Structure formats: structure tokens, C-alpha cells
Image (cartoon, rainbow, N blue to C red):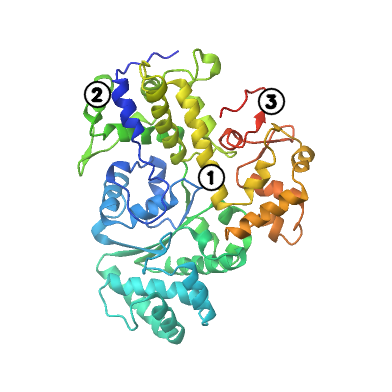
Amino acid sequence: MTQPEFHFDPAALRQALSDLPLTTAKENLDPPKLTEIYIPAQHNKALLPEVSIVVGMRGAGKSFWTAVLANDKTRELVSNVAGIQPGSNLFVKVGFGLSEDNEDFPTNKRISSLMDQGCTADDIWRSVLLRHALSALEKPLSFADSVDASALWVVANRDQADRYLAECDRELYHQEKVLLLLFDSLDRLAKDWGRIRELLSSALQLGLECRTRRAIRFKFFLRPDMVEEDDEIWRFADSSKLLHSMNPLTWRPNDLFGLILLHLANSESVGLQFRNAINRQENVQWREVDNVYLWPRELTAGDQPLRRIIEALAGPWVGTTAKRGFTFTWIPTHLSDAKGGLSPRSILLTFQHAAQWTADNEPNHKAALHYEGIKQGVVEASKIRIGEIKEDYPWVGPLLGALEGETVPLTTRELTATWTESCIKASLDAAKQKNRLPPRRYSNDPTRKGDVQALVDDLVELAVLYRTEDGRFNIPDIFRVGFGIKRKGGVKPPR
């Protein structure tokens, strides 16, 4: 066992952990606080203007980074850390995103209305680009400054629009500026997958066209299924050139822990003491930018000294002995999905809830977090993760809900036997009622439509299920626990 070498005030750290922010899961374009921005080294490339395609699971940071890059102050911090183009030379706008009242880009309702008025998808995206290009150069508009007016003007003046874009590109280049257009939350472009595919493919084609320009770049934050599972989206000439510039938004367990520790390092109540305690052991240099202490990357590059810090906060084991698991590895293992994907929001929730549980139930515990609090934190994170998956894919809830009380792993027959006709109907109705897409293969694949095995594959695609070596199906703990599903060889899920 590795003995912790760091000495912290457990009660003070417990209070600071109770105040962890949860803003990594963005629901709008408001920028986060500078103290909430942790930049994993593997995200550096994804934030560069030259990288057109950024792929990430739910909660990986797609909307978070969209909000960060779209704001001058937060983008400047990223520039200092990750080395992207200086903010003074980068003009960033959002081409599509979460906000429902942002006049910079059309909502899905406006898109639908414009297409009903004769606009093509290309007309709409070209008008968004033209509007922002003229604005970046402070040039007068040839149309009223609105989403509708610009799109309808492009329909009637396509040749002129293309000439304007070429002129804007030249002027931006000569002024040593770059216009970067961000696209996020693209699953909300429309209510049916066919229309989403049409709109997304058109935007990607325009983004590819702009790669030949000198000062205009597009960046698309995409879900994995949009890249890996739907060839129709990419069925246009030279689409591979975009995919070659693709970068994933993945989180190593070390960086998730780093996100927690960044908060402690910048806490008004314990920040100074926390940084001093680490300095006494590691003698690191804390870089300060705009009154924000950046987390030293050497502390998360490997497992040490990070593991010693986490063990000083939460103890070495998830129990009284090592038999129940080591805290440093147990937490990320129980928070990952079937593909090993980890969400910042999940670990923030786990630590926040663990701190609150410990304060309420074990206030005199020698570490900031009690192991039972950590377990309960994972249960809470599971509930939230399930809430997220139900929000994005409402059809998942009835299918996994039918497995309550079952024991995994299950054979295909055992799994699908729980899905009665009424269960599948409830699954499809849930998606329809919440205006979300139905299971893609089961509902849209021309050769597999209505095939229950297609439902299994849809869940595997979402990393909710995975196949074991013997061909059965298992469910990762982050989903299993919240649905009350048992595991062979395991203990009853905590409640």
C-alpha cells in the first residue's frame, strides 16, 4: 500500500468539495468561470482552429468548449495554456448551438421555417457564415441583420454572396485574422434523423469548402454515432479530408482527478493551504493567469504523485481493506461507460456528494471523504448519468427499466425476453413524446427495421451495453446501479 504523504485539513477540504461546480455539463452558451477550466493535454489539439471535427460522448465537454471558445476572456486563458491562436487574431462565432434565443444562428424552428420558404440547407449555413464574416470585418450588410433576412437574401443573390465571402476571406487574411465558426448540439437540428442528416451533411460540406480558404475555419463538435455509424452524413466528395482532421475529446482518469484538484487549488477557503501542502512534497511551480492558478500538468502526467494526493483526500481503499478495491482505480472504473468513456460531470458529482455524505454521517473521519460516501457518490452520479441518457435518448429508459432485478451478464435471448411488445412500444413512444430521435437501427435501418437485435446493437452503440468474451451482454456500473440491475459475483446495488 502506498502511504499518503500529503497532510490536509479534512473538514476544510470536505467543505470545499461540497461546493464543487457542475458547469462542465453546459445547457447554454454562457462561459464558465476561469477557475472551472481544466485543459487536459490531449484536448489541446481539439481546440485548435485547424481541427475541423471534434468527437465526444455526452458530458465529454463539447458544449463546454464551445462556450469557452466563443468567449474572448475564457478563450484567452485557453490560448495561454494550450497555445491556440491569440484571441486578438481570432474572431469566433457559433453557427449552431444550445441557445434558443441567440440571434447569431438559427434555431431548429427557424431552420424548418426557412426551408419551408424555399431555402436549402446550404443557403442557411452560407448565410450564417456570410453574416459573421461581414461582422468580423465591420462591413455593412446587404440585408437586414437577422437570421431570416440573411438566408432569404442568399437564396436570391447566391453569386453575390459567394463574391462577398471570397472578399471577406482575402481581407481577413491580409489583416492576419481568422474567423472560426463553431457547431455544437447538432442532434437538435431537427426532430427527425433524415432532416438532421441533410442539415449536418450540408454544413460539413461548407466546412470542407472553407478549408481551401485562408482565413475561415469551421469546427464541428459531434457525437460518436454521427461519425462512426451513419455513412450517409459523409457521402460527399472528399469528406475524408475532414475526417483526417478529427480529434477526440477523451478524459483520462488522471485528468478527471486533476479537475477536482484544480477546484481545491483555487478555492478561496483552502486554496493557499492546499497548494502549500503539495509544494512541501513536490516543489512545483504554480502558474498564475488572471488570478487563476493553473494545475501543474506534471502532477497528472503519471499515477504518482497524483495517487498519493487522492489517497490523502479519500483514503487508499473503498472499504476497511484492499479487498473492496483501491480508491484511485475504483472510482473511474465505476464511472465509465461500456467503451471506457468518462464524464467530468460524473466525477464532480461523485466527489461533491461524497463530501456532503461524509459531513453528515462521518464528520470526524480522518480523511476528507469516507469510503461509504464515495460509494453513495457513485450512486448519485449513476442517477444523473441515467437522467442524461434518458434526456438524449428517451427510448433507453423503458428498455433498461425492464431489466430491474435481473442479473447480468445475460444472453441475447435472456436480454430481449424482458422486452415485451408493450415495453418496446413504450420505448418508441418515449422518444416521440419528448421530440427525440428513436433507436436508429431499429427505426431507420431498411434491412433491420423492427428487428429486436437491432435494439441490442443500438444500446451497444451508446455504450450502455457491451459484449463479454463469451458473447453475453453486460452493463457498466454507471448505468447498472441506477436501474437496480444485479451483477453476478457482485453485491446488491446500493440505494
Residue at (51%, 12%) from the top-left corner? 321
Quarter of the image holding residue 486?
A: top right
Residue at (46%, 74%) from the top-left corner? 124
The quadrant of the picture occupied by the N terminus is top left
Q: Residue furthest front?
A: 360
Q: Residues within 10 Å of mark 1 (few under 14, many from 20)?
A: some
In this view, the mark in front (2 or 1): 1
Tell me the SS state at disc 3.
loop
Describe residue 212's horizontal placement relative to residue 416 as left or right: left
Q: Is residue 149 above or below residue 366?
A: below
Quarter of the image holding residue 483?
A: top right
Residue at (66%, 57%) from the top-left corner? 429
Between 380 and 6, the one nearer to me in the picture: 380
According to the image, label 1 marks what residue?
387
Describe residue 164's horizontal placement relative to residue 233 as left or right: left
Q: Is residue 47 above or below residue 484?
A: below
Q: Residues within 10 Å of mark 2 (few under 14, many from 20)?
A: some
Q: Earlier in the sequence, mark 2 or mark 1?
A: 2
Disc ID at residue 76: none
Q: Determine whether label 2 and label 3 are within 8 Å by CB.
A: no
In this view, the mark in front (3 or 1): 1
Quarter of the image holding residue 236?
A: bottom right
Q: Provide residue 449's location: percent of width, then percent of height.
A: 75, 58
In this view, the mark in front (2 or 3): 3
